[in-house]
Amino acid sequence: MSKVDFISAENFQGQVEEQTGTVVVDFTASWCPPCKMLAPVFERVATKFEGQAAFYKCDIDENVEIAAKYGVTTIPNLLFFKNGQVVDQSIGFVAEGALTDKVQNVVSG
């Protein structure tokens, strides 16, 4: 069972921009090999932080306006939100340990 739901333009504002606490969004696309490599890592980290942070995937092909708003031109692209504001970013594949550290820094920061 996936811990990570897809998010779209319809619910992005409410689920990400208006949330208090930590939200991590993986901007991705179905045709992107590094995105496919990152997917299981992202799922595992989402499981580790259940109850502490929310995790979503956003398909850039289906949500062009959200990708443009946040300047996402390279994928995979992880944006780390704290209380609705982008506080960190990770572009490209990231190892599980490094991703865990980034999320922990945002959660505890």
Image: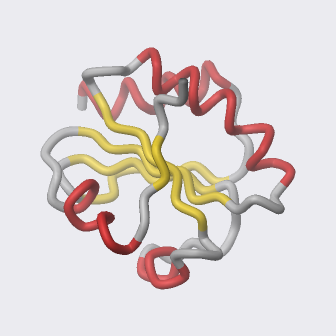
Whole-percent x, y for residue 53 in the image: 31, 32
Whole-percent x, y for residue 73 in the image: 65, 75
- Residue at 36% x, 29% y: name it: 105
Does residue 34 sit above or below 86 in this rendering?
above
Say which of 41 and 81 sits in front. 41
- Residue at 41% x, 44% y: name it: 24
- Residue at 49% x, 23% y: name it: 101
- Residue at 57% x, 59% y: name it: 27
Name the side, left or right, on which 56 lies relative to 85: right
**Quadrant of the rendering where the C terminus is positioned:** top left
Name the side, left or right, on which 41 lies relative to 24: right
Whole-percent x, y for residue 42 in the image: 59, 33
Quadrant of residue 31 in the image? bottom right
- Residue situated furthest top in the rendering: 48
**Quadrant of the rendering where the N terminus is positioned:** top right
Quadrant of residue 22 in the image? top left
